[in-house]
Image (cartoon, rainbow, N blue to C red):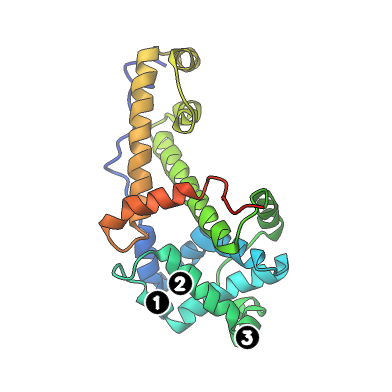
Amino acid sequence: MPSSDGAGASPGAGGRFETTQWSLVLAAGQRGSAAAEDALARLCSLYWYPVFAFVRRQGYSADDAQDLTQGFFARLIEKGDLSAADRTRGRFRSFLLTNCRYFLANQRDRALARKRGGGRVPLSIDVAAAEGRYERALAHSETPERLYDRQWCLTLLDGVFEALRAEYAEAGKENVFDRLKEFLTAGEDAGTHADAARELVTTAGAVKVAVHRLRRRYREELRRRVADTVGSDEDVEDEIRYLLETLRPSRDAV
């Protein structure tokens, strides 16, 4: 890979800006439209697992957690609750958690949920995969709320990685991303730069530049995604700090 158009060059960040998470929320609050149904499907695909993990941690079986998760999102749209989730009301993460608590406390909603959302929610949950993910999450002993927040953070980070990989793939540089992504979470030194340079057929200097650009795009994409879920720009950094803190072992773990 020549250094002139290889690792040292990063994909353009300005041209790709997909529909934001927050616009999905607002669209889902519009009843009776195809756009709302599509937004709900995409919203559920983004956020179903943190909700599933929270419900599961409350002591429900995997099958009941599946039904309750589907019913929860169906109920939000049925009642129009998402229309209240505007940017002046704080974090969407907290909004979903609060509504999920109310939902679980309501016996009538629970009965509705066990009908798998009455067939209304276009959400397919792979219970076996979700259970495997949940069992791995239990390596951390924590409250349902802490588990929910940590899984929310991991969901966001997964989305960041997927978006960056798509950018690099679009530019024909997916192999560059796959080789350099380790620098996003690990330290680096001249040796590791040299190793990556040999594999990518470029120079260590080009790798160093590429890593710098990748980290910059990572920060930008993380910030953009978090900004979609909080009430104001001023809340973004606090939310990032809080979410990253959830990845550390809880002091209350037993």
Q: Height in image: 86 above or below 192?
A: below
> For the residue marked with disc 2, what is the amino acid?
Glu
Circles 1, 2 touching at the beta carbon (< 8 Å)? yes
Q: How many marks?
A: 3
Secondary structure beneath dot 1 equals loop
For residue 107, the mark is: 3
Q: Nearer the viewer, residue 199 or 48?
A: 48
Q: Residue at x 63, y 85 (%)?
A: 107
Tags 1 and 3 touching, CB below 8 Å: no
Q: Residues within 10 Å of mark 1 (few under 14, many from 20)?
A: few
Determine which residue is flagged by label 2: 37
Local crowd at mark 2 within 10 Å, few (<14), some, or many (≥20)?
many
What amino acid is labelled 1 in the image? Ser
**Vertical placement of residue 201 versus 225, above or below:** above
Q: Which residue is mark 1?
A: 33
Question: Which callout, 1 or 3, points at the residue further toward the start of the chain?
Answer: 1
Instruction: Tell me the distance, in whole angstroms, between the alpha carbons under discs 3 and 2.
Output: 26 Å
Q: Amino acid at mark 3?
A: Gln
Q: Position of residue 175 (x, y in %)?
A: 48, 27
Indicate left or right for 56 with 6 as reference. Answer: right
